[in-house]
Every structure is written in C-alpha cells, then in structure tokens.
Image (cartoon, rainbow, N blue to C red):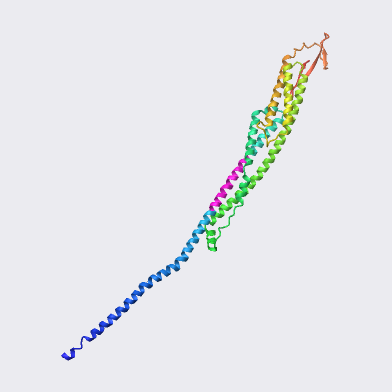
Amino acid sequence: MNHDSAPGPQPAAAGAQTTAGDSSGTGGRRRLLRWLVPAAVLALLVGVGVPVGAWAADRAAAAEAASADAARLDAAVAGATEASARFEATAGLAIEFSETTAVGVRDLVAGRTGEFSADAAGALTGSVDALTASLAAPVAQDAAAASSLDWAPAAGDDEVRTHYEQLGGEEREAARRELSGEVQRLDGLAEELDTAEAEVRAAVDAVDAAIVAAAGAGAAAGAATIAASGYASAEAKAALEQSVAALQAVAGTSLPLDWTGRAETPPFVELGAAAQGYVDAAAAVRDSHTANTPAPEPEPEESWDGGDGGDDGSGSEYRWCYLPDPFGFTYQVPC
C-alpha cells in the first residue's frame, strides 16, 4: 500500500507549472492592450478631430462674413432712408416756395403793389434760402452710393458659400427688397423735385414780369397824378417825383432778379419798399390836392351844357379837372 501511494504528488507539481505559464501569457497580453488602446483612441481622435475642427472653422468664417455683410446692408438701408427723408424735405420746401411765390405773383398781377410788403418779401427770402441749402446737400451722391454697393458673398470655398447663402437668406432678401424699394422711391422723388424746380423757375419768371409791369404802371400813374394835381402842395409833388424815380431806378437795376447769387438785401425787397413808398407818396399827393382844392362856386340855376367849362350867368367861367390815382379811380375836381 505504501508503494502504491508514493508517486501521488507528481500530478500536482505538473499542474503548478501549467498555471505559471498561463499567468505569464495573460500578463503580456494585458501589457500590450495598455499600449494599443490609448494609441487607437489617439488615432481616432486625430482622424476625426481634424475634419471636425476644419468644419467648425468654416462655419465660424461663414457666420462672420454673413454678419459683416448684414451690417453693411443695414447701413445702406439706413443711408437710403435718410436720403429719402432729405429728398422729401427738399421737395416740401420747393412746393412751399412755389406756393409763396404764387401768392406774390397774384398780388402783383392784381395791381396791389403795396401789399408786396417787406414781411412778405422776407418770408419769400427765407423759403428761397431754405430751398437753396437743401438743394446743396449731396442727396444724389448718397443715393448713388447706396445703389452701387456690392452684395456678393465673401470669398471662400463652396461649403462656406453654401452656408452663407443658407444663413438668414430670407431676412437678407427682405432687406435687399427694402433697399431696392427705397432706391426706386428716391428716383421718384428726384423726378418730383425736378418738376418742382421747373415750377419754381416758372414762378420766378412770372414774378420778374409782374414786377416789371407793376413798376412801369406805377411810374406812369405817378406821372399822371403829378401832372393832374394842380392844387397839391409842392412838397407832396416833389416827394411823389422822388418815389417814381426811385421805383424806376430799382426796377431798372435789379431786374431780372438773380435768385442764386443774391446780395444780403434781395432786389425784390428793395423794389417792394420803393413801390410802397410810391403808393404812400401818391396818396399824399391826392390828399394834398383834395385839401387845397377851393370850394366850388354854387351851381348856377341854368344846367351845365356838359362841356369843358361853364357860365354861371354872371360872366365867370370855370373848368373841371379829372385826377387819376394809382388805385384805378378818377376824381372830378374844379380846376
């Protein structure tokens, strides 16, 4: 029994050797995996991270380019809106000037020279100055600059360009349509301004003609008043003669009116003052004539024959004089 049981421990020793060999192989594979896994992860990150980084950079560049172009578009729309407002203001001034001028023309043509006062002339001067200042603004240059802006996308590859076109496309198109509408409205306002300018020039020509006609008619009426007012005082006659001479002098030196290079005192203000002085002097001559006219003799019993003179039956003869005034009336007074 003892002989049979002696070799018993040998299988156990052999098993121990096998376990040691397996443990050594497993440790080698583990060490290999410790190197391979980080290397694979690093390779994966490098292979994926580079394209992702490039894609992100492209997106950032596209967004920056789109933002810059949107800012330029907003600035252009704001500039066009401002130019449009200036056009509207200029057209309004032109219309106001035309209406103010038309009032002066109507007064002058109607013969109411005295109503063309210094206040009315000053108001007209103010409207002319405002219109001139507005026309001097570089509105046309603003409109041209707004309509000539370049709206092409920023340079770049196809992906960036596609992203730019997709980014805010509807808003950008709406802004473009708005800008196009503003430019068209500017063109329409420019045409209206040209029409208003033509109307203003026509009104200025009418003012020139009316003032010349009024000055000539006033001078003629003044001469007739001086000649016919036999009982007016010498002072009143001399004042009327001076006013007629002043009226003729101002009309002769300041017409046609120069509306672009006016002096500090516009010519029509001087002419209006001269016309008012003439009207006042003519009225003074008329009043002086009426005050100094002798009382007429009692009308004879026999009726007047309608001639230039008459006989009251006592042998004394008298004559009638007809005194015109610059207002269109004629007075019958005894000479």
Which quadrant of the view contains residue 126?
top right
**Prevailing secondary structure of the magenta residues:** helix
Span of residues in magenta: 70-92
Residue 196 in percent (x, y) is at 67, 41
Figure check: 92 above or below 146: above
Asked if residue 244 lies left or right of residue 126, the reply is right
Residue 235 in percent (x, y) is at 72, 17
Residue 297 in percent (x, y) is at 77, 11
Q: Identify the residue at image location x=53%, y=59%.
A: 164
Residue 238 in percent (x, y) is at 73, 19
Residue 80 belongs to magenta span: yes
Asked if residue 2 lies left or right of residue 266, the reply is left
Asked if residue 40 lies left or right of residue 253, the reply is left
Which quadrant of the view contains residue 28?
bottom left
Residue 177 belongs to magenta span: no
Q: Identify the residue at image location x=77%, y=22%.
A: 224
Q: Quadrant of the C terminus?
A: top right
Which quadrant of the view contains residue 315?
top right
Figure check: 134 above or below 220: below
Q: Residue furthest top?
A: 314
Q: Quadrant of the N terminus?
A: bottom left
